Image (cartoon, helix red, strand yellow):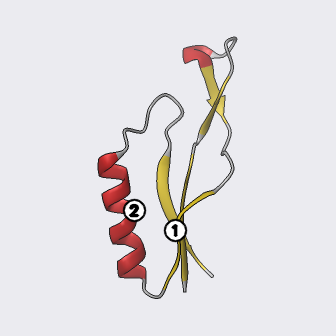
Amino acid sequence: MFKVYHRTWWRRNPRAPGGREPGAGKKKTIKGFVATEEEARSICKVWNANHPEGLLSDRAEYERR
């Protein structure tokens, strides 16, 4: 079983170089739980292709549950 979600990898900080600093954000569920790693990987690939990462690097991920 795999949980599929997205989150940011940076947080805003106007005093830091580039206006951001490292800081993983809250995990936001995309799909919920799927049975296989292949399905989880596919969902992440599609989500990332259709959502620009932006300044805070918002990317889809998955983890085994």
Counting residues from the N terminus, which is met first, the one under dot 2 or under dot 1? 2
Spot the residue most to the front: 31
Answer few, some or many: residues within 10 Å of disc 2's Cα (few below 14, many 20 plus, some between 14 and 19): many
**Image quadrant containing the N terminus:** bottom right
Instruction: Please name whichever residue, 18 or 39, is drawn nearer the observer in this view of the structure.
Output: 39
Instruction: Please name whichever residue, 64 or 32, is drawn nearer the observer in this view of the structure.
Output: 32
Depicted 47 relative to depicted 53: above or below: below
Query: Residue at coordinates 31% horizontally, 59% vertically from top-left?
Result: 46
Q: Position of residue 27 (x, y in %)?
A: 64, 56
Q: Please name the residue that numbered disc 2 is placed on.
A: 44
Answer few, some or many: residues within 10 Å of disc 1's Cα (few below 14, many 20 plus, some between 14 and 19): many
In which quarter of the view is residue 25 placed?
Answer: top right
Query: Residue at coordinates 31% horizontally, 48% vertically from top-left?
Result: 50
- Please, what is the three-letter code of the amino acid marked with disc 1? Tyr
Depicted 57 relative to depicted 63: above or below: above
Instruction: Say the numbered circle drawn on residue 62.
Output: 1
Depicted 3 relative to depicted 29: above or below: below
Query: Residue at coordinates 38% horizontally, 70% vertically from top-left?
Result: 41
Q: Is residue 2 left or right of residue 41?
A: right
Depicted 20 relative to depicted 3: above or below: above
Q: Position of residue 65 (x, y in %)?
A: 63, 82
- Please, what is the three-letter code of the amino acid marked with disc 2? Cys
Q: Position of residue 61 (x, y in %)?
A: 49, 61
Q: Position of residue 35 (x, y in %)?
A: 47, 88
